[in-house]
Amino acid sequence: MILPIPRGTRDVLPDEMRELHAINDRLRAVFSAAAYGEIYTPALEYESVIGRGALDGARPAYRVFDENGSVLVLRSDMTVPIARVVATRYASAEPPHRFCYFAHSYRGVRPARGQPREFLQAGVELIGAPAPGGTAEALTVLCRALDAAGLRRYRVGLGDATLYPALLDSLGVVHDKRDALLEELARGDFVGLEHGLRELELGEQAIKLLLEVPQQRGGGDVLHGPAGPVADAVAGLRAIHGLLEPEVAEHVIFDLGLSRAPGYYTGAVFEVYDPALGMPLGGGGRYDNLLGEFGHSLPAVGFAIGVDRLHIALAAEERL
Amino acid sequence: MNGERLVIAIPRGALFAETLDWLDGLGVRTDEVRANDRKLLFSDVGLITMRPSDVPTYVAAGAADLGITGKDVLMEQADAAISSGGRDVYELRDLGYGRCRMVMATRDGPDPASAALRRLGVIRVATKYPRVAARYFDDTGRQAEIIEVKGSVELAPLTGLVEAIVDLTATGTTLRENHLVVREEIAESTARLIANPVAHKLKAAAIDDLLERAGAL
């Protein structure tokens, strides 16, 4: 008898589970050595509570009612629940706080390989450590974890979520147009971005800058090019890079157009790429305002690795 | 990682000839592709050929680094309703050729679509682009029953299956020959150069080099 399960979910049988455990054990050893304590939060949260932090791109997709009629959601990431935990349980503790997790989250994505609706993430949150030091620590832990997992050819793209908004500000692009432009950029639709910019009658020089800057990606030379309106963000990236050990820095590429959903990122953002996989296998960034939404303002940074994707990439790298 | 070979997915069909001409202009050798009607994979020059609607699929999965396909295909496959928190493919350039329009058309004479909407509240629409059509009628606040057909869309309004069609037209000749007239223009489509998001980062130098050869940034 065939008894179906929902699209975008799967049963994990012992062969796969053994391999996932082996990956998680290696990641956990790195997190643990860096003094990140493992944490677990419930998969179900009150929508009214978790909704304070959930923003576009990672809005919870699955809702149920409890016996009192309260709306519960399945968490869409671990960052927002951990922000809630810190505000509730660590309000009087001395920061920084270091947490790691291995947990499933849920999103209403179009199911595909490496993109299930229930997905396992391994990640860390470093709360109370400002840029650039905290960011450099998170990147270091990320690279050590990927090294330990056995991934060899990966790169970490490093950008800044404030860079493009600052650039738009400096050229006087008003707020109601900005969101549409940022949306085009987040989708990687450079044709749409150009159309949007041309409608604004900004002048050829400004349009050229707004199209060229977000397409700059590669080695350190990217940081020597444009200054002016993006100088702050670029200086921030340079400061992070200066703090990285050589064996971490060699994995980092700079990407001035990098923008990530969800929208709570406030500074450096990063994404992990591997030539064996057509999609990013993890990412993260700074979210200095999220804790404030829970009434306990602290600068923070974190990342999540998609364990399912890491597993696919490791399997594919074996064949390369 | 830079300087690595790029794999480019190119569309057979209406965009095929102009795509090959465009690649010639970049110095990519296309003579083998031109000479071979059945072969699909040309690994020497990094070209794979396929139906236009398959191009985004191969590029999104990373089976090809770059691809060329029509904006109509991209519009149909962009699934705005189910946000995956990101993008399947990057759209790098409007290549300008293969220009056509996505239109809503009905039989000539009195507009049967507005009559259906007025008297019955719902328009029936035949199309090969069900998502584009559904989104368009949603956005314009009209109830539409979208009927997906695979073959000649023009047949559907002539036989009374539907009141209107949503389809692509370049010259309008096929529409005219079937006594159909364009009632509304939905979008304009041209050939687009798309990229896999990971390849766009990891093969940045090779891709930028190709874009530079293709014309000013």
Image (cartoon, coloured by chain):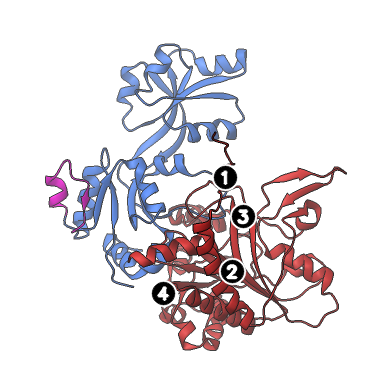
Chain colours: A red, B blue
User: What chain letter is assigned to the residue under label 3?
Assistant: A
The answer to whether residue A95 is above or below residue A17 is: below
Tag 1 and tag 3 share a subunit: no
What mark, if any, has residue A284 been given in the picture? 2
Q: Do the residues marked 3 and 2 share a common chain? A: yes
Q: Is residue A276 visible?
A: no
SS at circle 3: loop
In the image, which disc is placed on residue A152? 4
Region rendered in magenta: B30-44
Nearest to the observer: residue B35 or residue B72:
B35
Tag 1, which chain? B
Dot 1 amino acid type: Ile
Judging from the image, mark 2 belongs to the subunit labelled: A
Task: Name which residue type carries label 4.
Answer: Arg
Quadrant position of the N terminus of chain A in the picture = top right
Relative to A284, A99 lies left or right:
right
